[in-house]
Amino acid sequence: MVSKQGWSARIARMDFVESGIAAGTAPAAAGNNPGTMVSLADIAEITPNSPVSASSTPTSTSSLSPRRPDWLKVRAPSGETYHELKRLMRSKTLHTICEEANCPNLAECWSRGTATFLIMGDTCTRSCGFCDVKTGMPAALDWAEPLRVAAAVVQMNLQHVVITSVNRDERKDGGAPIFALTIRRIRKVKPDCTIEVLIPDFKGNEAALEIIMREQPDILNHNVETVPRLFRKVQPQDHYEWALTTLQNAKKLQPDAVTKTGIMLGLGETLDEVLGVMRDLREIDVDILTLGQYLQPSKKHLPIDRYWEPKEFADLRKIGYEMGFKWVESGPLVRSSFRAEFQARALSKRWRQNNPAKDIATAASAPPHLLLAKLNEQA
């Protein structure tokens, strides 16, 4: 654990570099030239390790998948607002996971003032069999990216923002300082916007996680994705233990933190295995759970084993609440950031303290049992 004095020194160095970027005196995207790179590695007193060599992406041995049922057919996003926001993203050299992952809820979320930004580039050092983000050696980190994300949040008038990233295993800190700077910049220019971070596991590195937790995101999210038996096939460079450690350490570092995770269904898992993961998550006090259907991005990705029925998702939602999760989103088209703005406003202690009058009104879509409990608290 880092001492208070040690953390104060780190924050001072973060402010120094951030001020330089804001004033235009620090280089921004410096490509691969380390001589012109603004480095925040000393913030965590971590030396970048040698680049990793990602293994090949798992591919389907068969192109045959079950026929997609009617309940999974959605209309492609369109309209003036959608195209305007897309142009804004490109003008700021930003990426959204909404677009990269072809999220079926993109238009709905953007219309409600919610978007998910993909930071630290569009190239990942890991090769998960379900993911459509390309694998390879990423370019150097761009320390001006937090400024551009914050500017986009203001221009889009976002009420809730999700910050996620590729894996950056070539760095011991996994790029955690970029997350921290992004949270800080958004809070400076739009303090009423709730912030969720969907982070990598950082290989269970608590020091990297602490850099983010000190900025007090409204929700700390790390997706488990699948059941332990399928980890090697689905996400070969990840470990189930790293995922649980990340979520557990978030509560350790900030006991009142809101933690969240998600599971994809349809990769060959059994119901008993899913329930086992849910029990593991409750043992480490995870607050929010999302469950959605895996959809194959292309024939090169892992095939769909089966489509879970809407009723099965409804049953899992009910079981989740019975287990003690504070919020469960479970449905075929549910993705990690689905209705995330309601989750943040209902559960984030920081947001509720700053917006006591809006607490119930803005969380009108909260689960009935949670809304009733909150009304009783205020009575």
Image (tube, helix red, strand yellow):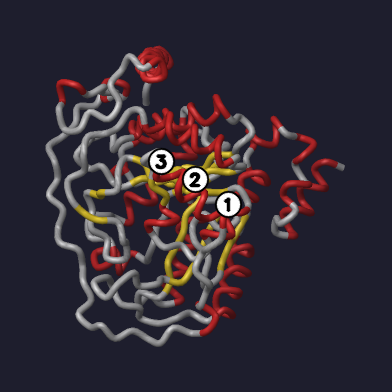
How far apart marks 1 and 3 lie (CA) works out to: 26 Å
Residue type at tag 2: Val
Q: Quadrant of the C terminus?
A: top right
Report helix, strand or loop for mark 3.
Answer: helix
The residue depicted at 27 percent of the width and 65 percent of the height is 129
Q: Quadrant of the N terminus?
A: top left
**Crowd rating for badge 3 (residues with CA inside 10 Å; few <14, some 14–19, many 20+):** few
The residue indicated by pointer 3 is: 91
CB of mark 1 within 8 Å of CB of mark 2? yes
**Crowd rating for badge 2 (residues with CA inside 10 Å; few <14, some 14–19, many 20+):** many
Residue type at tag 3: Ser
How far apart marks 2 and 3 lie (CA) works out to: 20 Å
Residue type at tag 1: Ala
Q: Earlier in the sequence, mark 1 or mark 2?
A: 2
Query: 107 and 69: which one is in front?
Result: 107
**Relative height, residue 12 to residue 239 (above, below):** above
Report helix, strand or loop for mark 2.
Answer: strand
How far apart marks 1 and 2 lie (CA) works out to: 8 Å
The residue indicated by pointer 2 is: 162
Q: Earlier in the sequence, mark 1 or mark 3?
A: 3
Please state the horizontal and vertical placement of residue 171, each as a whole percent of the image.
Answer: 22, 36
Q: Can you name the residue that lies furthest to the right here?
A: 379
The residue indicated by pointer 1 is: 340
Please state the horizontal and vertical placement of residue 310, each as a whole percent of the image.
Answer: 57, 79
Instruction: Identify the mark at residue 72; answer none if there is no mark.
Output: none
